[in-house]
Image (cartoon, helix red, strand yellow):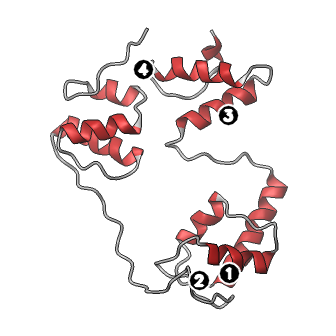
Amino acid sequence: MNNRPKLNTRISIDDFKNFYWYKEELIDFCRSENLDKRGGKIELAKRIEKYLQTGERLPYQEKKSKTSRFDWNTEELTIETEITDSYKNTENVREFFKNQIGGKFKFNVKFMNWMKTAQGKTLGDAVEQWISIKTEMRTNKKEKQIAPQFEYNTYIRDFMKDNPDKSLQEAINCWKIKKSKPGDNKYTKSDLK
């Protein structure tokens, strides 16, 4: 039984906000209404919501263009190398960090987010930051954060944590029911009913 409304211009704002939509569905809607189809799921949903409320077509927010010509794929990297606006997590960068930190080096979300905001700092600062993040992760044992657009992953993790005796398939089945109903897509005990 699917009570999910169709995603079209007649949908109410409440229904749009209360139901789960796949990115492909959001892109299809944008295509049908001649809205910009670029961007992540959250940006697409905001663009559609604005359009449904006001008829206004929000443009895609271009990321500001990079001015640095530093090539993170080929340049020789040292601890004094400045992090530029053109920074990318390349194999060259990975090798640099492995040489500095050791074989245990891996990119993680918190570190990559730090790197995005580290323009003007050095790779030496980045090494210190990575070590600090890893130390914090070992001592805090905090649950890894899942980005908001990954509702499925968050739901499955929370379901499995709350129901260690249940199978992944049971979690997936509950997710399928949850996302077809209005409301948020967060796991609750009542989902098992």
The answer to whether the residue labelled 4 contacts the one labelled 3, judged by CB atoms less than 8 Å apart, is no
Q: Please say if 158 is above or below 149.
A: above
Query: Is the C terminus in the top left, top right, bottom left or bottom right quadrant?
Result: top right
Residue drawn at x 74%, y 25% is: 162
Closer to us: 68 or 76: 76
For this view, does 133 lie left or right of residue 5? right
Position of residue 123 measured from the top left corner of the image (x, y, whole percent) = 65, 82
Q: Residues within 10 Å of mark 3 (few under 14, many from 20)?
A: some
Residue picked out by circle 2 = 121
Q: Please say if 100 is above or below 41.
A: below
Closer to us: 89 or 151: 89
**Alpha carbon of mark 1 to alpha carbon of mark 3: how far?**
33 Å
Residue drawn at x 80%, y 50% is: 141
Residue picked out by circle 1 = 125
First reached walking from the N terminus: tag 3 or tag 2:
2
Q: Amino acid at mark 3?
A: Arg
Quarter location, residue 90? bottom right
Residue 157: assigned label:
3
In front: mark 4 or mark 3? 3
Residue drawn at x 45%, y 23% is: 183
Number of callouts: 4
SS state under label 3: helix
**Alpha carbon of mark 4 to alpha carbon of mark 3: how far?**
21 Å
For this view, does 170 lie left or right of residue 7? right
First reached walking from the N terminus: tag 2 or tag 4:
2
Residue drawn at x 41%, y 12% is: 2
Position of residue 174 measured from the top left corner of the image (x, y, whole percent) = 59, 19
**Alpha carbon of mark 1 to alpha carbon of mark 2: how far?**
6 Å
Residue picked out by circle 4 = 182
